[in-house]
Amino acid sequence: MATIRLTMAQALVRFLAAQKIDTGEAIYPLFEGVFGIFGHGNVAGLGEALHQYREQLPTYRAHNEQGMAHAAIAFAKAHRRQRMMACTSSIGPGATNMVTAAALAHANRLPVLFLPGDVFAGRTPDPVLQQVEHFGEPTISVNDCFRPVSRYFDRITRPEQIITSLPAAIQTLLDPADCGPATLALCQDVQAEAYDYPQWFFAEVVHRIRRPQPEPQELMRVLNLLKDSLRPLLIAGGGVHYSQATEQLKAFAEKFGIPVAETQAGKGAMNWDHPLSLGAIGVTGTAAANAMAADADLILAVGTRLQDFTTASRTLVQPASAKLVQLNVGRFDAMKHQAIPLQSDAMAGLDALNRGLGNWRSHKEWPVRARQEASAWHDYYDQVTAESGVESPTGLPTDAQVLGAVKRQSHARDVVVCAAGGLPGELHKLWRTEDPDSYHVEYGFSCMGYEIAGGLGVKMACPDREVMVVVGDGSYMMLNAELATSVMMGHKLIVVVLDNRGFGCINRLQQATGGVPFNNLLEDCFSVPEGAPKIDFAAHARAMGAEAEKVNGIAELEAALQRARASRSSYLISLDTDPYVTTTGGMWWDVAVPEVSSREAVTTALQSYRLNKHKQPY
């Protein structure tokens, strides 16, 4: 058997460079590159290997380990899980900084390969710098924190172990049902150890993502349920995008007269103005989608994990009045909420249903009502997103007015990026998608700080699109370093910072559950007598190399967006906004209210909470 002598790190990098993906359009490298921040746990071994193979597998340097991992995850999402990146850090703070991002990838079922450095397998120099010693278990390191947030985890303690572990990690990253982060913790001495690897290990491999087909008996049961229904509603989830099934979904809905609502991950599956499009559903849903869901006799959920925001904490779908069918590639999700399962790839499942339904259609009045409900919602949209909008208590622009301005200055193929706070809810309800890939909101983990780093990843994946990041001041302060990375790498972002002086979304939730404004808006936080400082976000962005300006009001914002679009560099625009006003349309969300309180507002909120709890199935 022909062999080649390499260090473990060299072999790992060479193997990753040999992995390709057939997307159906062309064959590409599976890994775009490696984001790396070096330290003593990876600079000598993996750093040397990455330099040696930098032409085959590029290395990108970020400013924060969590941020670079967010960018890698966003890159994979923008590529519909068909292409991805790896991230490497030293052991210690560098590794643990990536754990939050690993949890985000796990919650959203998105692929990213984590390669944190680890302790010495030989243990001779223990305890090394940044090593956290577990007194009762010397094999534990901080990298064990990755175990609960990885779909695949291995600690490489001998160089030959990657021969079996790397292919297993790749298959996890590409599996449509088990997709998520894979972690290979690389002991730092083993990175530098040599081994005679078989030549075949480095042969080019072209991967293709599987499309599991529906099981015939499950398919027949679902076909019979659909044929018996008069008022079916389809909920489109992220699996529709990852399966590249948006055209199949639209054709299916049109053929059978089924209105379509969308989850956060599924948004964009249908254009906003399609006659059967109801927009967002659930807690952050439109009045149109939620009204239709309440009267539906069958819910066909396609490619969604049905988290609590989608189901309104299990109150949206009432088992006594509507059947729930889960068309999902994953067994875990297909069985959720006591659903009737149709375990299948989204495209394959829709095709099979299409063939089996024959001439059946929903009741003729059902699509008509969908158009009426959607029309009423569009009228409401026009009202709340107009420059005059809804008058706010502070006189400052609302989130809806800002999003209306951003939309008016955007093009159909522009990508809007957001993550946490009140903005994702407003975007879910209000953003008018005109392209399946134009909406990128991370709401599976709702991770503050994802926005700018995620925007960088989207821009790396879609360099021909304008990427528009909308972010609150709270999230911006959490993690903004990758704005400097975008400037350094030449990946232009347009960033709009809505400064409402604190965590406006949670302040509203606090008061809705009977609480007093406390520790959310800066004016309600512990501070010096002069109050919290007024942060100049534009000056901060300029200090990181971006162009930036602060504006006042919607008209100035729209003019600034035109200047930002004309710029060749990353461009930040900040403006003061109102923290109190949000749009209507959404449903109840289960947030527990204290059962004992001396305050009447809490007691009143508890009574309302108990009434809503009775709507849940158990």
Image (spheres, helix red, strand yellow):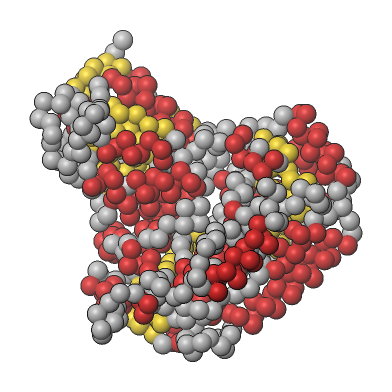
Name which residue lies at 74% across and 75% down.
Answer: 376
The answer to whether residue 35 shows anywhere in this view is no
Q: Is residue 149 above or below residue 10?
A: below
Which percent across, then down, holds residue 539? Answer: 26, 78
Is residue 408 toward the left or the right of residue 325 in the image? left
Does residue 251 sit above or below 210 in this rendering? below
Quarter location, residue 603? bottom right
Toward the top, the furthest residue is 1
Q: Residue furthest left?
A: 125
Q: How far across and how far down the image is residue 468, in percent? A: 45, 67
Q: Nearer the viewer, residue 347 or 297?
A: 297
Where residue 88 appears, as percent x and y from the top left, is: 28, 42
Q: Residue at x 41, y 26 (%)?
A: 167
Picture layout, residue 67 above or below residue 20: below
Residue beneath the point at 35% across and 19% down? 200
Q: Does the rendering let one see residue 260? A: yes
Q: Which quarter of the rendered picture does the N terminus lie within?
A: top left
Seen at 73% across and 43% down, the residue is 325
Q: How many marks?
A: 0
Report the front residue among 245 and 97: 97
* Rendering quarter of residue 564: bottom left
**In the rendered view, does 338 fall on the left or right side of 181?**
right
Residue 493 location, quadrant: bottom left
